[in-house]
Every structure is written in C-alpha cells, then in structure tokens.
Amino acid sequence: MTTAINTEKEYQNRLKHFTSLKSKYQATKYNDSSPSSLLYLILRKVDLGIELTELEFSWLREQELFKTVEIVCLQQQYKLEELRNLENEFSLLKSQYQVPKLSGAFKNISIILYPILWKFHSGNPLTDSEIEWLKNNGLGATVALVNKMELERHFFALKAKYKATKYQGSSINSPLYKILNKLESKQRISTPELEWLIKQELFETAETFRQQELKKEAQFAELKDKYQAIKHSDSFLSSPLYLILQNIDAKNNLSESEINCLEQQGLSETIAIAQELEQTREFAALKAKYKATEYQDSTPKSHLYKILKRLELSNQLGEQDINFLKKRKLSEIIEIANEKYTSTLKSKIDLGELLNQSEIEWLKNNRREDIIILAQQKHFAILKRKYKLIDPSLPLEPFYAIMVKLEKKERLDPKLVLQLMEEGLLSNDGKIALAYSRLEAEFYEQEFHRTGQKWHIPTASSYWRKAEEPEQALKLTNLDLSQIRENKLKSAILVTRGAAFRYIANLADAEICAKTAMEFHPNSHQPYTLMGAICYDRGDYPKGDYWFEEAIQRGAEIEDIDAERKRVIRSTKDENKRHEAAEYLLRKDSKRYVWAKSYLKKSSDNGK
C-alpha cells in the first residue's frame, strides 16, 4: 500500500515538473502531458544544459514546436558565448597574474585557479590555504605578485584612513608606508618621521599622531593613578613604567624583570596590586578547575585559595583542609583531589617506585585497597625478576613479604625461613638464599662485635661462605686461636675457615684447617666431613669415603653425608671430573646413589 502511494506521489511531481518545463520553453500546445513523453526527456536535457542531438531537433520541428526550438538554440548560443567570455577573462587574469601557459595535466588546476584569481581581482584577500595551494602548484611568481599587490592595497587603505592620499607614491618602500603602519599599531613615530610628514605637507596625518600621543599620555596618567604609581614623576611615553602598567591593565602576569623595575622605583604598592590581581585570576581559574565556582569569596585572602594552591602542588589534602571543605559543602573538591592523588600513586607504581607507609595508610582510609594490591603485584613482579624466581605459580604471600624484608635488610622470622626451606629456596645458590645468608652473616658478625660472644664467629663465617663471600669469612676467622680457651670453639672456627678456603679452591689451606680442627675436637664429625669433601674435590674418592665414614662414626647422619657428596658433584665445574665421580658412586652403590645417573647424562650430552 505504501509503495503504491509513493509511486502516485512521484508521478504527480513529474507531471507538475513537465507542465512547468512546457511553460518555460513555450511548448504548451503539445497535448501529451504524460511524463513518459519524449518531450519531457528533451526539455529535461535542455534545462540541465545538455546539448540536443539533430534527431531531437528534428522531432521538435515535426511536432511544430518551432518556438521551443528557437528558445533552445538561443540558450545554447548564449551558453557558447558565455564560455568564450569566461575563457577570455581567465586568459586575461592568467596574463595579469603571471600564470604560465597550462598544458597537459596542469590544465586540471584551472577549476581551482580561476576562482582564486577572480576572488583576489575583485578585491578580496586570499586565505593562507589558497596561498599554499598556489605555491604547491608551482605558481610562485603569482604568489609574489599577489603579496606585492596586497601590500599596495593595504598602503592605499592606510593612506585613505590617515588622510595621506595627497602623497602620490605607492611603493611600499616609501617612508610613509612604515609611518602609517606605526600609526595603525599605535606605535610612536620618531621625531625625524614626524618632520618628514610635515615636509610632505601631510599635516592631517601628523595631527593624527599628536592625537594618539595625547590619548596615550592621558591613559598613562590614569594608569598611574589606578595602580598607585603617581610617585613616579616620569610621564614620558617611552618610560618602561607605561608598558608595565599597560601589561597589568591587560591582565597579564608581570615578569621577574618588570617586578625588579618596579622595586627599583620604589613602587611596592603597584607590585602588591598587580600580584593581588594575578592571585585573583588564579583563584578564579582554580575554582573553575575544582568545581567551586559557587563559593562567593573570590579574594586571594580566602582560605579556599590557599587550599587549592596546596592541592595544585601536592595533589593531597590535609585533615584540616578536608574539614573546611566539608563544612562548606565543597565535596567535589575532595573527590577531585582524591582522584588526582590516586592517579599520582598509580603513576608512581607504574614507574616501579614503592609506596611509603603514609601513602598506603591513605589508600586504606579511602578504601582503595585495589591500588595497594596493584602496587604489591607490580613490586612482586620486579622482585621476582631480581631474585630470579621464574615460577609463575609462586603466591604473593608469604613470598612478597619475605622479599620486601630482604630488600629492607631485615632478618626473617623463623616461620618465614621455614617456608623458604619448604619451597627449597634456601637449599640452592639462588638469589633469595644469597640475600638471606648475607643478612644472617651481617647480624651474627655485628652480635659478635656487640657482645664479644665468640661463638657468633663460626656462625657468621658459615653464612658469609653461603652468601658467596668467602673473603669475608676468611677475614673474620683470621684469629689468634691461642687467645681462645675452648677447643670446641677453635675447631668450629677452623671448620668454617677451611670451608671458605675450599670455596676458593685453596685445598691445601683447607686441609690444614680440617686436620687442625680434628686435633682440637677429635669427636666432632664436622672436620671429618670437611676432609671428605676436600678429597672428593681432588678426585680421591676412596680417601674421601674414608673421611666421610669417620664423620658418620662421630655422629654425622648418613643422609647429610650423601647430600654433601651430591653438593660436591653438583658444584664441580670440570665435566670430566663430575662424570668420573658419578661413575664411582654408581659402581659403589647404584641404588643409594641413583641420582648420580643424571650427571652421567649431562656429561654425555655435553660430549655430543
């Protein structure tokens, strides 16, 4: 139904259009008024400016529509004449504005060029984009001419405005053009320039300058009164004070040099007025920024101004400031400030910086635990990279707390140490183990110096070695043992010293320490364990087994001795020696030392 209505409406519109065209082109005597008529097609073509074919003209004559033919012929003749006129006009414009002959693809720019030239020729200035178009299309000479003519037009307009038309010269290099430009921009002209105007009998132009000067002098006096600078007696318009006062009146902030100038002239009241105006403008801008425009007090003495100034600098409100804002129902400022401060903390986190305790407390008080968690997760990721913990499943707690303590050089609680041991993070040479050992070494060495308790020496020495700083262990244990009474303590010190020598591959001094320790404490298994490890380092495995067996007889656990064997093989850098040791243990007891097979495989793979 709707389609039928639309079709009928379209038919009626075409019918009206056809009727109008028949009237316009005097074809009303043609009886067929149907839009499907050939006449409707012909008249539509004519109305669109499309030339008719000879067949179409013949058809019109057959229908005795001679008047229509005459109108169409006249219309087409007029069109041709107009086209020729346009071409002639364009040709003249091109010649006048130094456009080179257009050929080839360059002819396409005529469509844009003609209106540009016509516009300028009719007295309208060109836009920057139009000038740029001319340049981009290689019409530099045209641009130069247009610029020159623009200046000449400007000169002519200035001469009319400042009553200097009697001056015949039109060159923009004329002294008059420079003078008139100064008058236009309200600049002062020099005495020689004024004399030149008088000499050229341009008295009205000179009078214009005098009137401008009188107005400026009156304005200078008003400004001095307005900004309390009347004590300054200089009334010359060349005075720097005039420019400074104009700056203040234009609501511009004073520069440091301008303030210094006012200070030198003792105009402290002027400075105070200018600064108060600056602060008032700043206060208004801050009120708009922080959505406090409904607050009536606009003076810089307002406490709100001080709050907003502080907020700009720190992004954080103090408790007193918050109370002030709440009492005056300026809650939007608090919300904006909180968002700003939150964004600042987020940026700090993104840069890898840590939040301090006061920042964390602020986030807690403002229920932004999500930011705290984000900070912890970011920091945890950084610390995991630092401590080379690549396990993605490692939970945030307790390991984040552990690494934070290590970063702060705080000793770990026994519970945290136990958790590290359960994860195997203290049983290898990872960075967690090194950091933990270093902290323990520093603690026990400090305790030794603080209390004089010598049993802290072997403990600290052992931790220094585990922290891969054997030199510190050797330095700490470089003692005169004759000053120590307790043989058990002497033995413990020598064992840790021997272990440090062994770490740096000084096996000879390590052996001396181990054997001397046996003499001081024959029943301790530790010197024998050390001696066994030294023999394994040398590749003398049977002798090493002898010393390990002596250690077991003195109380060493078999599991601990086997673990020591495993550590020796793991830390051996020589692949051949590692392979040899593994083979020896497998021959000795393939079930007990089944773990040694992995070292055979590694050696085999490396061999390939």
Image: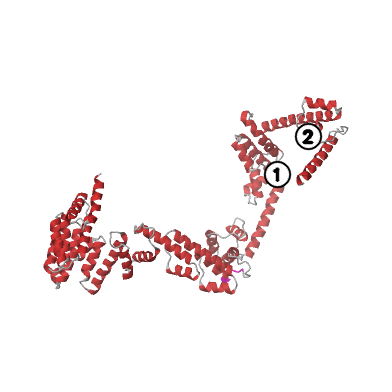
Q: Residue furthest right?
A: 29
Left or right: 51, with 334 as reference point = right
Secondary structure, mark 1, is: helix
Occupied quadrant, residue 451: bottom left
Residue 306 among magenta residues: no
- In front of the other: 364 or 154: 364
Left of 36 or right of it: where is 266? left
Q: Amino acid at mark 2?
A: Arg
Q: Position of residue 75 (x, y in %)?
A: 80, 31
Front residue of 27/308: it is 27
Residue matched to label 2: 44
Which quarter of the figure is the C terminus placed in?
top left
The spot of residue 431 in percent (x, y) is: 31, 60
Q: Which stretch is magenta?
A: 298-303
Dividing the picture into quarters, in which one does residue 493 lie?
bottom left
Q: Is residue 4 above or below residue 497?
A: above
Task: Tell me which residue sits at (22%, 58%) in the image.
Answer: 566
Residue to which mark 1 is pinned: 157
